[in-house]
Every structure is written in structure tokens, then in C-alpha cells.
Image (cartoon, rainbow, N blue to C red):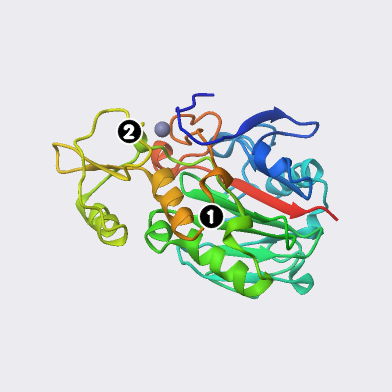
Amino acid sequence: MKTRPIPYRTIEYTEGEHIPYLHFPMLDNTGIVSHLFTTRLGGVSEGIFATMNLSSNRGDDKTKVLENYRRVAMQLGCEEKDFCFSDQTHTTNIRVITEDDRGKGMVRPQDYKDIDGIITNVPGIALGTFYADCVPLYFVDPVHRAIGLSHSGWRGTVGRMGEVTVREMSRTYGSDAKDLLCAIGPSICVSCYEVSTDVADEFIRAFDIKNTPAWDGQGNDFDTILWKKENDKWQLNLWAANVRVLRDAGVRPENISVSNVCSACNPDLLFSHRVTKGKRGNCGAFMMLKP
Ligand SMILES: [Zn+2]
């Protein structure tokens, strides 16, 4: 696994009893959640979906996807009926997940649309969101015992999805941003993420960026969101942008953990939309409050 040096506490890889997975020690240490980020390993799917694909609408065999979910559930410590999923369309819409939502997206139809963030305080409901380069955000409020997962691609990041999620947890559960533990999961790194001027302009506006240094080929300066290249292209650091969003929301820097694992640097380990030009499955971020 290729990793990139970053100044924040980060992620670990574990060969679990049922599947290999990535996880944040910072969240494990709370003792109140079970969480993981899946890899491509440990499943039964084949070809472009090999092996742990969690998308049932990109052409994979549905029985294989179900077996993959069965293994994720076992590793997480729940059953398939306990899952509840997002309906991701690059919005900043959040849904408060209650007991009534248990199983939606897995064993029951979803009766909601365009939901990129899900939050809950119900123990034993396993939230799930899906990725192939976009940024997964994990939220744990150990004081009010509430959790959240949000999907933050470049559009979500411009829309400050992390801050929207913090605000919704405050409104719903009384969460104080200062208590929240937040983790930024595996996704595309700055070196792999070249963007065009229209995307760069959105970030310059959203983050009030005054200076864009010339791309140094590394991007290890974690305070810099956007780097300028000579070819009229830019390198975008979604990890830095999401750290900024969370800090602006009042999350303490010492309570932010950032994955140093890039989906595009590790195409054998994680699904990457960029590397595969869209011929790929999905990885998943999962989290549940322990029953
Ligand atoms: Zn990379």
C-alpha cells in the first residue's frame, strides 16, 4: 500500500477475520463505534469488479454483491437487515436516520433520494456510503452518542459538506463541534487529482484562495488546497480542503484524522474512477454505534 506523508493522525490496514479493511484508530479508541473502509480485497466479484464490489447498479452480478455485503456485515458485527445507505448524487443533503430506516437500500427499498450524508443516534444501524476517488467523511460524537457519514466529492467539498454535516448533528443531537471526532477516508490524493480551470475557479471562490503556488510535484504542504500548473491545469488537494471545512466548522485539529491512502495511487487496493475511466465497482465506508 502506497501512502503519502501528511501531518495528521491517519489510517491502518487490518486483515480481519472476514475481510481486510482500513480503519481509523482515533475512532476505534472511542469504544462506541464499529467502522471500516472496504478495499477491493476479500470479496467474490470478478473482472472490473474484483473482488469486493459494493455497487449493484454498475453491472455486477447481484448475488456476488450480496455475498460481498454479507462479509462486510460480519466484519462490522451486524446483519444485512441493519444496513442503511445514502443515495449519493453529489448534493449536500443530509438525512436523519431513525429506527424506521433500518435496512433501507439493502433489504428494503429506499424511500428517499439525493442524500449524500446520513446521521443517526440509533445503536446497531450500520450506515453506509460509497466511493471510487471521492472523499468519505466520518463523524463521531462521543458525548451525545451520535454518528454520521458524508460523501464529499469536489462538488460536495465546494458545498462544504463536512460543515453541513456538523451543523445537522448539532441541530439534531445537540452535538458540539469541539467534541466531534472526524475522519477523512481513502480518496484521490493531490498528486493524482489534476483538474481544469472551471473546477479550480469553484474552489478559489468557495475557499477565498488568494495565492495558488506553482505545482511542486509533491503537494505535501497540507495547508495548500490548490496548485497551479503550466498547462492551464491545477492540482487539487481534497484532503486539505476538507480539513479546512471541518476546522471552519469548529472541529479541533487534533480531532481530525486524515487517511494517507490514495485510491488512484493504489488501484489494486481501492476502486478508482480516474484510473479505470469509470469501469469499476465501489468501495464503502461503514459505521455503526455499537448496540
Ligand atoms: Zn494518488
Q: Is mark 2 within 8 Å of ligand 1?
A: no
- x, y percent for residue 34: 75, 47
Marks 1/2: CA distance? 24 Å
Query: Quadrant of residue 127 in the image?
Result: bottom right
Query: Quadrant of residue 274 in the image?
Result: top left
Callout 1: SS: loop
Location of the C terminus by quadrant is bottom right
Location of the N terminus by quadrant is top right
- x, y percent for residue 189: 41, 37
Residue with the mark numbered 2: 219
Identified at 24% across, 29% down, the residue is: 216
At label 2, which amino acid type do we have? Gly
Q: Is mark 1 within 8 Å of ligand 1?
A: no
- x, y percent for residue 126: 74, 56
Please give the label number shown on residue 251.
1
Q: Earlier in the sequence, mark 1 or mark 2?
A: 2
Between 99 and 251, which is closer to the camera in this rendering? 251
Identified at 57% across, 39% down, the residue is: 49
Q: Is residue 192 left or right of residue 243?
A: left
Between 69 and 57, which is closer to the camera in this rendering? 69
Identified at 20% across, 52% down, the residue is: 210
Judge whether 272 appears above or below 249 on screen.
above
Would residue 170 be visible to someone looking at this image? yes
Mark toward the viewer: 1 or 2: 1
Between 196 and 267, which is closer to the camera in this rendering? 196
At label 1, which amino acid type do we have? Val
